[in-house]
Amino acid sequence: MADHVQSLAQLEILCKQLYETTDTTTRLQAEKALVEFTNSPDCLSKCQLLLESGSSSYSQLLAATCLSKLVSRTSNPLPLEQRIDIRNYVLNYLATRPKLAAFVTQALIQLYARITKLGWFDCQKEDYVFRNVIVDVTRFLQDSVEHCIIGVTILSQLTNEINQADSTHPLTKHRKIASSFRDSSLFDIFTLSCNLLKQASGKNLNLNDESQHGLLMQLLKLAHNCLNFDFIGTSTDESSDDLCTVQIPTSWRSAFLDSSTLQLFFDLYHSIPPSLSPLVLSCLVQIASVRRSLFNNAERAKFLSLLVDGVKRILENPQSLSDPNNYHEFCRLLARLKSNYQLGELVKVENYPEVIRLIANFTVTSLQHWEFAPNSVHYLLSLWQRLAASVPYVKATEPHMLETYTPEVTKAYITSRLESVHIILRDGLEDPLDDTGLVQQQLDQLSTIGRCEYEKTCALLVQLFDQSAQSYQELLQSTNSSTMDIAVQEGRLTWLVYIIGAVIGGRVSFASTDEQDAMDGELVCRVLQLMNLTDSRLAQAGNEKLELAMLSFFEQFRKIYIGDQVQKSSKLYRRLSEVLGLNDETMVLSVFIGKIITNLKYWGQCEPITSKTLHSVRKLVKLSAVQFMLNNHTSEHFSFLGVNNQANLSDMRCRTTFYTALGRLLMVDLGEDEDQFEQFMLPLTAAFEAIAQMFSTNTFNEQEAKRTLVGLVRDLRGIAFAFNAKTSFMMLFDWIYPSYMPILQRAIELWYHVPACTTPVLKLMAELVHNRSQRLQFDVSSPNGILLFRETSKMITTYGNRILTLGEVPKDQVYALKLKGISICFSMLKAVLSGNYVNFGVFRLYGDDALDNALQTFIKLLLSIPHSDLLDYPKLSQSYYSLLEVLTQDHMNFIASLEPHVVMYILSSISEGLTALDTMVCTGCCSSLDHIVTYLFKQLSRSTKKRAAPMAQESDRFLHIMQQHPEMIQQYFADLRNSIVNSQPPEKQQAMHLCFENLMEGIERNLLTKNRDRFTQNLSVFRREVNDSMKNSTYGVNSNDMMS
């Protein structure tokens, strides 16, 4: 007994150290000791002792947490009787101690929910012992307010627990439990929550009383968790909020046909304080999203009428909407009105004219107060976007009145954004334009809204643009204008250019008229005139945000008005011809190319503008006006191509994009013209010669050499990526090999520990050996394929051997410093092994160790990587498993010759990869396993035949491993079959055994394609039969794990 008391005291001290101490070392020691405690055999008994006799809340929390881990473990689970005892103990503990610390109560309720969920299908004397949840909590609900709160929280937490899948148990098991819970208990729990809410609202609760306030909050959380349940296993998340339909079961119809349910939540909203009303609105959002098919037309119309009346009442009494949480949830509720109901249904609601007026006024007011809850605006714009998009399709005779209110919304959005500019600059607030994702989302919505009554939208934009442009021009011409005033006008023009681009892009959603095209022409003329003005000032000053807006405008214009589908007689081009002399799309494209050259010249150091500009280049390859860029791609004309000592090495990524675009432009007319190619490569030739000169001296400026090299290899990778035809790629290959390959090898030797240098070099080599579009096709008399592989092998070996000398690398730096380079080496090796331009048999034949060196380096690198890292880093996973697939397909003799521990490492990595979420990894593992087993089967078959050719020693070694572990192939299947059959209830074991018999029916002992196809067909039948068997079984869910 004394030992128990002493160990209890020690545990309490450790808990205090873990949760209270500020000393990191002490906390880590306490954490380590407590982890050992949770894994100790007497953990269960000590947890009960802590709950019974512990003097601190932290020790009770530790006990509850440890018990949760014990009941959750999948290996060596607790017996059923023990779990029942824990469940009963927890309920009694909570009932007798209603005033525990909140976090302890929460942990114990979590424990109860976890036991109940995991034991949902457990039987004792034909009784599902963990399903009596409402009976379990009834005694809490009939006691004090504190007990009621615990009872409601138990139901709420249980609903939430069952609704959430966890990674330690199969998804099929989770869905089976969730479906059973939904069918047997969830509606009763929801009904109970509604009844309790009705009782609470009828009692005039004193919500200043903390406990009564807490009870109402838990009741609302319970109702929300019921309505938020994943009824059909779609696993929706908040990112799909706009499209969410609540798939209420048909058995719940009565609750939603009863108008008192909906009325209850609207009444609660008006009667409770703002701290609780967001929960009420969240429930209403879910109720408004109930699937349409739950009702017939008459029922749906009645339900919608009640919903709209409730919304109207909130809009008429908007006091609580000053709370940001209430406001946000109400905006979500408004959006659901249109996402779940059609405009033709809304206009038939009795109060529709008044409601649409109130919603429009609310939206206009919200947009004008742009600084209040900006993340909620999305839902309001979503509502109006859907309403506007529905106008052409509405068939109802009742007026929708959107032609009156939509222009008001458009005007409010545009004017409020313009008015915000001055305030943001004056007060130093965060600029919404910095969040390009949010701006683009709002502009996409506005593009549809603005196209409704487009004449009004255009008139407004022309008026506002002319005002700002005139003010801007006057400020630039004035000698005493302030920079603040100029910045304000530039900010306003930035918004207007973005919005003009958006509404032009919105043309795709509507049938456009000639008059609307002419209006587009008015807007485009103004943007192009502004562009001429701003470009003329770039030598002195420029505005990055305005330039990005211009690029966004160009992208929208290109999508709508450039291409074969656009009528050449479009009134837009007539207007452009009258004002700017641009008669057709070719002339407009010339303006675009001019802008691209200007941007690359003046904005070379601005990554956002450069990358967006280069994105535009790729889409304008047809023009002859690009010759300037092809002939002048030097730092003199484009500053970002220079060696800027201030720039970071990793900031040169846009150079690859630039040269990919240039390479594609060059390819259009290059053909076999080697002189044109040599002319194009002159700047890169000069750069390589400069680096070669540096490397030839013992002392050189290392930073300059690094920058020159990194820029050069990024440029070359862009060209190599663009040259996907044999003729052009062979020109590049002959240019780089053998003259400049030694420089790349030297760079790897010197700077293997600097990822900013090695990554671009390795990526270039991986691109050069990639036989994309069969571009690497050497003549029959050419040794270049073998020579290219030698260089590849040399680079992999050089990098691999040196990177392994780094020693222990911190976990947070291991990918950047080591694994990223290794991943590229794996990709490089895979590309060259599967390129079909090297005969690998000649290496051994002529005593060349290039292949062996590359493969041995691969093994060394692989063994330096923990299994967990192989799957934790997606790029590493994909490169490793795709390489392994090639090795097992074409180089099994090498795999067979490896040491047993290496083979086991590879097999283990395949085993773990089979469970990966990435389909590409899973497929690669299946293929690798197929190749290995096929090889093994053939070797075993040969070894049993008489007069078989003597096997190589490496094959013997691999067979020896298999003989040491026969269960890997022969015994494993039998053991798995017996295990699955025995896990079934007795009456189903014969049927399961028959499934396995049918699986192997007609399967012969060979690997012919016909035999493989027959097995695949049998496997499909087997899977269907086993799934059907599982659906009909309510016994032992563990048997279902195999199909997860």
Image (tube, rainbow, N blue to C red):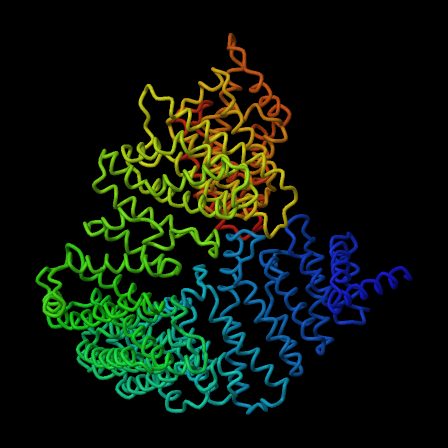
Q: 795 or 274, which lies in front?
A: 795
Relative placement, left or right, of 127 versus 840 is: right
Q: 535 or 757, which lies in front?
A: 535
Q: Residue at x 36, y 74 (%)?
A: 336
The residue lying furthest to the right in this view is 2
Relative placement, left or right, of 862 versus 995 is: right
Asked whether residue 774 appears in the rendered view, the answer is no
Q: Position of residue 91 (x, y in %)?
A: 69, 69
Q: Position of residue 284 (x, y in %)?
A: 43, 78
Asked whether residue 96 appears in the rendered view, the answer is yes
Relative placement, left or right, of 302 versus 745 is: left
Using the rendered view, name the quadrant where residue 640 is placed.
bottom left
Q: 59 or 546, which lies in front?
A: 546
Image vertical order of residue 937 relative to residue 412, above or below: above
Image vertical order of residue 781 relative to residue 570, above or below: above
Q: Residue at x 38, y 48 (%)?
A: 656
Using the rendered view, name the quadrant where residue 347 is placed.
bottom left
Q: 907 or 594, which lies in front?
A: 594
Relative placement, left or right, of 11 versus 760 is: right
Q: Residue at x 55, y 15 (%)?
A: 952
Q: Position of residue 718 (x, y in %)?
A: 36, 44
